[in-house]
Image (tube, grey):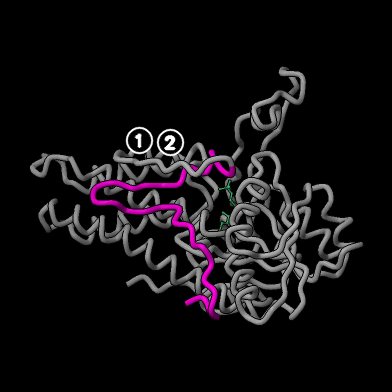
Amino acid sequence: MIPNKKKPEVVQSIQWIDDHIRIIDQTYLPHREFFLDIFEVGRVWEAIRSLRVRGAPAIGIAAAYGVYLGVKDLPEDSIQPFHTDVEGICEYLATARPTAVNLTWALGQAVRLTHDMKDEPFSKVKEALLDLAKSIHEEDKRICADIGKNGQELIPKNAGILTHCNTGSLATGQYGTALSIIYHAHLGKKKVHVWVDETRPLLQGSRLTTWELEKTGVPHRLITDSMAAWVMKEKGVDLVVVGTDRVARNGDTANKIGTYALAILARHHNIPFYVAAPISSIDFSIASGDEIPIEERDTGEVLALAGRQIAPSDTPVYNPAFDVTPHELITAFVTEKGIIRPDFSKNLEKLRPQQG
Ligand code: MRU
């Protein structure tokens, strides 16, 4: 539970309603709170791809519901074994976005469950896939609350905090990861002030994080990404805290483009740099960040701002959506199981889930 008297206005980015999911379409924020009802797997894929639903944990939750939406109307007497259908749907959903490991993590659970139930009737497997999605969703809420509680001890009583992208309720089941730490500190005894990086090109900081901090009453100020160094030097930033899309076994961390630059700036200014990471974002199959696939997105996202062209239309563009921060620049990870400090290779390994 969030401590203290006042509860934040908690946004539900994804809801399961009877036979479909309802998401808050994040592409309309902050201008409009528009809820989108999704009944089919193809629309789930599209919503993930276009960042209507975004943020690593939220992508995993949406995909888990997407598997159920993909199988629910399949005939129960299909000739091929049903796990082939489920694998096909999971392979398809996995193509929506490559970097956030929560997507393949959630899909992997669906595939495993289907294999474990290969001798059960398909109707039972369908029910179990919906239960799995609901439990991933509920579990994420608990995980985010625990990350928030665990991270509080890193926040001084009177703290200037810099964050990047959006890591709040919109990006998760509830509360968020890095933002959950900030909410918990704010709702406890601490006085926090958050510097919000706007996060070009898609402005998750200015469109989404400010919107969430406003709703929860956390004092904040918006800056453009290029102001971060100056703010660190002049304004008293006590810590940087960000989320992640994928952490390698050695602690190298993929997160929204611009995170790596912030980690370098933090090191230069002797400011601790924390990564809030649910264990579902740790990819135990890869040794280092070199193996993390980095999504490249449409050039139009850089050539235009708020629907208006800001460069000659034939300008060549490079648009990686994420970067990888080397583990040496990370002070600690905040997970639902506690704070993990270097040696990351050794200490992250202790969090590896045992396959039952
Ligand atoms: O492209 P996005 O908006 O999905 O990128 C999101 C991020 O980079 C977040 O920092 C990360 O997913 C963690 S969200 C708790």
Q: Which residues are magenta?
A: 1-30
Whether 171 is drawn above or below 309: the answer is below
Amino acid type of the residue tagged 1 in the rendering: Gly
Out of 207 and 5, give the one closest to the viewer.
Answer: 5
Whether 350 is drawn above or below 50: the answer is below
Q: Are marks 1 and 2 in contact (CB under 8 Å)?
A: yes
Question: Does the magenta portion include 236?
Answer: no
Which residue ends up furthest to the right in the rendered image?
Answer: 234
Amino acid type of the residue tagged 2 in the rendering: Glu
Whether 139 is drawn above or below 149: the answer is above
Identify the residue under disc 1. Answer: 42
Q: Position of residue 213 (x, y in %)?
A: 63, 59
Residue 102 can be seen, yes or no = yes
Which residue ends up furthest to the left in the rendered image?
Answer: 77
* Residue ID at (74%, 66%): 193
Q: Position of residue 138 (x, y in %)?
A: 37, 66
Identify the residue under disc 2. Answer: 46
Q: Quadrant of residue 237?
A: bottom right
Q: Position of residue 297 (x, y in %)?
A: 60, 35
